[in-house]
Amino acid sequence: MTSQTKNNIIIIGAGIVGCTLAWYLSRSYTGKIILIDKSDSANGVTQHAFAWLNVSYGRPNGYSQFRKQALSEWRSLDKLTQGKLKVNWCGAISWQANTEATHQFIESHNQTGFNIKALTQAQLQILEPNLRVLPKLAAFATDEGYVDPVYTTKTLLELAISKVLIIYRIPMYNNY
Ligand SMILES: Cc1cc2nc3c(=O)[nH]c(=O)nc-3n(C[C@H](O)[C@H](O)[C@H](O)COP(=O)(O)OP(=O)(O)OC[C@H]3O[C@@H](n4cnc5c(N)ncnc54)[C@H](O)[C@@H]3O)c2cc1C
């Protein structure tokens, strides 16, 4: 016979990291989960994020692989939350200072297995008709996307609360 002690889990910080963790834990953890924040959810750095889910600007290579894994986790989170996070998988277009640099940017990513398409000026114009200045070559990272960081954080928190998450908002003790 085994005896199991249920430990409480305390998460400090209701930014995107804390709320995502709370959501994941709330799916299977049967003990008490306490989320503590000195103010409100998504009130820290998270509210300022572009929240671009990207690999293309992650360097060096090890970090880029880590971001690739993060992107795949976002796909899985999007599925598990059944589209409620409204992730927009629109892809991302960018270009470098000159055509050669953009070409190298595309090549180097494709070599690491992350798909980035080359767009000619004409193709770019069709995709982005409002651009006034068009480079000769652009990079299109089709697998990337973005979220509204505040909405996403608050939605994850709401979904977690519905599965018995307890939240305490406490003042911060500045002297400790
Ligand atoms: C301008 C900008 C653009 C960005 N763009 C992107 C992007 O495109 N893509 C991307 O992936 N990332 C981006 N980031 C980074 C991303 O925003 C952060 O990595 C992410 O928001 C960090 O989340 P967090 O939950 O760790 O921190 P926070 O959102 O800061 O949450 C921490 C929480 O902890 C609370 N807290 C802190 N101290 C205490 C305490 N002592 N007691 C109780 N509560 C406490 C705070 O109130 C806060 O709510 C960007 C960041 C900035 C600033």
Image: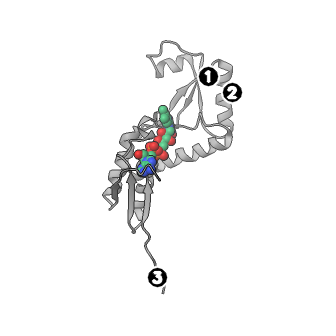
User: Mark 3 against mark 2, which lies toward the viewer?
Assistant: 3
Q: Identify which amino acid the numbered label 1 is placed on.
A: Gln
Residue in the picture at 38% in, 41% down: 43
Residue in the picture at 36% in, 51% down: 171
Q: Which residue is mark 1?
A: 96
Residue in the picture at 47% in, 16% down: 131
Q: CA distance from mark 1 to mark 2?
A: 9 Å
Q: Is mark 2 within 8 Å of ligand 1?
A: no
Is the residue 112 above or below the residue 79 in the image? above
Q: CA distance from mark 3 to mark 2?
A: 58 Å
Q: Is mark 1 within 8 Å of ligand 1?
A: no
Q: Which residue is mark 3?
A: 3
Q: Identify which amino acid the numbered label 3 is placed on.
A: Ser
Q: Is residue 86 visible?
A: no
- Residue at the outermost bottom position: 1
Q: Could you tell whether 169 is left or right of 106 in the image?
A: left
Q: Nearer the viewer, residue 67 or 175?
A: 175
Q: Identify which amino acid the numbered label 2 is placed on.
A: Gln
User: Mark 1 against mark 2, which lies toward the viewer?
Assistant: 1
**Picture coordinates of residue 47, whole percent (x, y):** 41, 38
Q: Which residue is mark 2?
A: 104
**Picture coordinates of residue 69, whole percent (x, y):** 57, 47
Q: Nearer the viewer, residue 90 or 11?
A: 11
- Residue at the outermost left position: 162
Nearer-N-terminus badge (3/2): 3
